[in-house]
Amino acid sequence: MNFEPIENYGVIGNMRSIALVGINGSIDFLCYPNFDSPSVFAALLDDQIGGRFQIQPQLGKKRVRQLYFPDTNILLTRFLADEGVAELTDYMPIGADGVEPNEIVRTVAVIRGEVNFKMQCQPRFDYARCEHAVNINIEGRCAVFSPASNVCPPLALYSTVALRQQSADVSSEFTLRAGERATFVFGGVRAQGEQPEMEFVEQRFHETASFWKSWIAKSKYRGRWREMVNRSALMLKLLISREHGSLIAAPTFSLPEEIGGVRNWDYRYTWLRDAAFTLYALIRLGFVEETEGFIGWLKGRLSDDAQRGPLQVMYGIDGRQKLDELTLDHLQGYEQSRPVRIGNAAYRQLQLDIYGEMMDSIYLANKYGDPISYAGWQEVQRILEWLGKNWQRPDEGIWEVRGGAREFLHSRLMCWVAFDRALRLAQKRSLSGPLDAWQHTRDAIREDIFANFWDDELQTFVQSKGTKDLDASVLLMPLMRFISPVDPMWRSTMTAIEARLVEDTLVHRYEAERTHVDGIPGAEGSFTACSFWYIECLARAGELQKAQLLFEKLLGYANHLGLYSEQLGPSGQHLGNFPQAFTHLALISTATYLDRALSGKDDSVWR
């Protein structure tokens, strides 16, 4: 098996679907037509049968450079050798009116010399479970792939060079000289006889570039690390459904948290937690429209489930509730990391912290956007009425443990946040409600945290009631303004975390191999979002020099394009699903706070 490292990929997308493009010119992952549709290319998970779409210059000893066109999600892969230089441009077009066909455009050009190319398009429909037929038109410029099952739509490859069939695949070998180019368009089948307007490909390129440049230009961030912050924002925008307003945690499934391990999950869904934190990060940059779109989507999710609450932990991007977890035993998995899972059984879990993250987003959206509607405020009251009766329940927590429900500190903290933000919102907007009852509950939660989640012997807050385990999610306590970042109890907690969970600038979520709290065998890498939280805590405590040093070191763990997966392995390799919203939103939060602190600006306007 020949797997590219996870960090060797860039991503392109159109806010409907996302493709991973390797530095070798191969699209090794694509779910189509939507984020959570079955895969069409999945060589990232099985090099033999997963499927890919590769364009390779036939050069000798070559160097490769991959970069984004500035302030866009248009990817350029440059191949350099003594005999020639070639460039591959990849993007998914987005028109100003949002009606562009759902397609990938790949254009290869020669800058110097004469270069031979080989193209292979090998779709494998429905997670490589469905056979398909191929038909190439008489001109040899269009190939239609027709799956045997109606689970997946037929797809087409349009080309400016001749195509030929190889079994169920399509290939092409062609030569270009300096100044010449060839274009391939992959996506849905156009109407009978209709071809993509190849002569307008350059116009589509400029329209797409203009869309991304216009969007990121709305960012109010002008501080240090602007390039990394903008890249994170552009990546997060890719994960937001243009159709629904929901956003996914990551565009991939089953990339392992440990090579050869079983911690392989499907993240192509909308977690309320991840969505809320993402929106907070975007609000910090001045993007409010995305928050309003998400809250509009959220209105349709409320239910009367008295057992797990009025909200689920996660949903499909279209709001569907069932996300049944299955294993794909025919796929080998990334570097033999099995099982390969689709769906996510955690949707059935109780995770009480989501109510705090949701209320924090609603509070911030109201603070920096439009005021909440009467009906919206009624829904908030209904949610808090349920939470007021259930905040003491054990749950599966932020890390979605499968080792049994507990009373987790983070869940308790975010229940406090839910009531705190509702009270603040009511006061700012002069809204009516059972404010006395909310204040009583908020204060009771606060006292419960200090009474039952503080360990006098260890001088630290612990992961769950009755244990001596540490958990990096405690780092959100000062970030959520529950405790002062210079409180002696917090300082000693930081000392304990640094001793047991921190390696230089890298932070582990918890001691997985020692505690087995998650009920899953094996280990995992450091969790990059927690590393950013740790740095922000240092900054809030006034340790600005140390925070800046560790932040800039952590930026060095990004891949060549400024992208991060979920975790980092022992040798610094990227692990887990990629790219990960949670990591990039934490980067934005830390960068914006640290920049203001270093500039001597008051950050109290936030939260």
Image: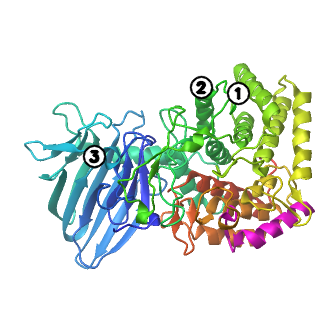
Which residue occupies 62% across, 37% down?
291
Report, in whole angstroms, how far the alpha carbon at label 1 lies from the one at label 3: 46 Å
Residue 315 position within the rendered picture, expressed as x and y whole percent measured from the top left: 56, 36
What percent of the width, then of the height, locates residue 524?
A: 59, 65
- Judge whether residue 139 can be spotted in this image: yes
Of labels 2 and 1, earlier in sequence is: 2
Looking at the rendered structure, the kind of residue marked 2 is Gly
Q: Residue at x 80, y 47 (%)?
A: 413
How far apart, in angstroms, are the residues tagged by discs 3 and 2?
34 Å
Q: Quadrant of the N terminus?
A: bottom left
Region rendered in magenta: 486-512
Q: CA distance from mark 2 to mark 1?
A: 17 Å
Q: Which residue is mark 3?
A: 186
Please identify, in this view, whether the residue under mark 3 or under mark 2 is nearer the observer: 2
The residue nearer to you, when weighing 585 against 462, is: 462
Residue name at image x 73 percent, y 39 percent: 364
Could you tell me the amino acid type at mark 3?
Phe
Task: Mark 1 or mark 3: name the one nearer the start of the chain.
Answer: 3
Q: Which mark is residue 306?
A: 1
